Image (cartoon, rainbow, N blue to C red):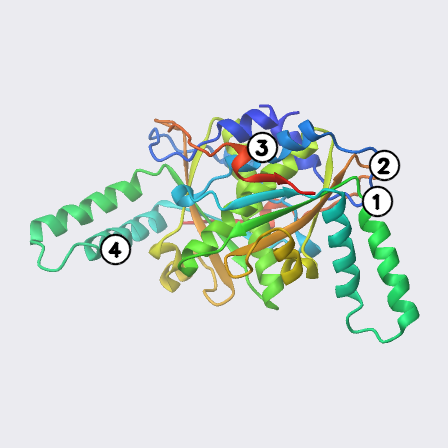
Amino acid sequence: MDVMEAISTRRTIFKFKPEPVPKEVLERVFEAGIWAPNHGVTEPWRFVVLGEKAKATLAERYAEIQIGKCADGVDEETRRKAGDGGRAKFMSKPTIIAVACEQTGVDQRKQEDYAATCCAIQNIQLAAWAESVGIQWSTGPITLEPETHRLLGLDPDTQYIVGFLYTGYPEVVPTPRRKPLSEVMTFTE
Amino acid sequence: MDILEAIHARRTVGKFKPEAVPRDVLERIFGAGIWAPNHRLTEPWRFFVLGDGMKRFFGERYGILLTRNTDDEEKVKQVRTNVLTGFLSRPAAAVISCKQEGPDQKKREDYAATCCAIQNVLLAAWSEGVGVNWNTGPLINDPPCYEALGLHPEASFIAGIFTLGYPEVVPDQKRTPLGQVMRYVP
């Protein structure tokens, strides 16, 4: 796929077909990540592919978080439904990969390593799109919890989870909206 | 150009041919930036292509910042001249800034979106035969540079200063194999 086509047609995908992404496709896609620009070549990115056991454990936690979002005094039935909905939503993502970033050293380095990992994720999203694979980059309470880090063999003190990439073949491709370039680009004197 | 080819072959470029990058090419390159993924569609990125006056200002500021702890007047003068000449010799220069307002998590996500916009810009440039150097030196925290662009340091962050042009030299680059940074957990 052409560079400009991949960049301008890529969308965040929320609804997937049930099939998981084959391992060889996944590895081609993630290999694109390691070619991100990276000041000092620190290679701070870490990719952890969730197996069924880890996915089920996190789906339970995700369900708890959804229940926790219910207002005080909400009845048991509504809470149960919120939990079931959350669990089902998490389990509906065919393949989940946690992307973490090493965060050691001075603040400037931490920031640059985070930037490099974000660029790696963009490479991954574009390479995925060229393979007809869609991704949602998700951040939320679950990616920030130390328990999640430990489950995935990551150190919560030095390895920051930049996001979960929900990955699969798109069921629905959303319509994009962006301001015209002229509103965000200036040619100065 | 194929997207995977662009991703693998793209390099940071520091040495450029003297030819300018035409305005329509610059617009296509930065136009790729706005298609970055962006939580809540805040569109936090701003792209500034520096004209001759602004380029000179940034080149002068860079020299001043690099010599701020030097007492030797002769050396200060020499470094400032060299830095300015070097900066002006780059065929094009640009700044990409990012809005930084609201809660920390929003700031972080807006910075992440801007980094993705930058990666789009780097790849789009490469497919146009244009090389880019993403610089995060002292200028990105220099209040006079913010002021010159009409930015407020409390509300925006300069994510990078970019020099662009047609590559004279394309450096080699190495990466640790994927197997050492990717794991499968049960």
Residue A31 visible in the picture: no
Q: Residues within 10 Å of mark 4 (few under 14, many from 20)?
A: some
Residue A155 % position (x, y): 48, 64
Query: Left or right of A11: which side holds B25?
Result: right
**Cα gap from disc 4 to disc 3, whole angstroms:** 38 Å
Give the quarter of the image for residue B152: bottom right
Query: What residue is drawn where x is 73% and y is 53%?
Result: B58
Q: Circle 2 sits on which residue?
A: B18
Label 2 close to label 1 by CB (< 8 Å): yes
Chain that bears disc 3: B
| Distance in Å between CA atoms under marks 3 and 2 | 24 Å
Q: Amino acid at mark 4?
A: Ile
The chain to which mark 1 is attached is: B
Residues marked 4 and 3, same chain: no
Give the Cα distance between marks 4 and 1. Answer: 55 Å
Classify B160 as above or below A15.
below
Q: Which mark is residue A156?
A: none
Name the element at disc 1: helix
Residue position for label 4: A65
Q: Which residue is mark 1?
A: B89
* Closest to the observer, A139 or A28: A139
Residue where numbered disc 3 is placed:
B31
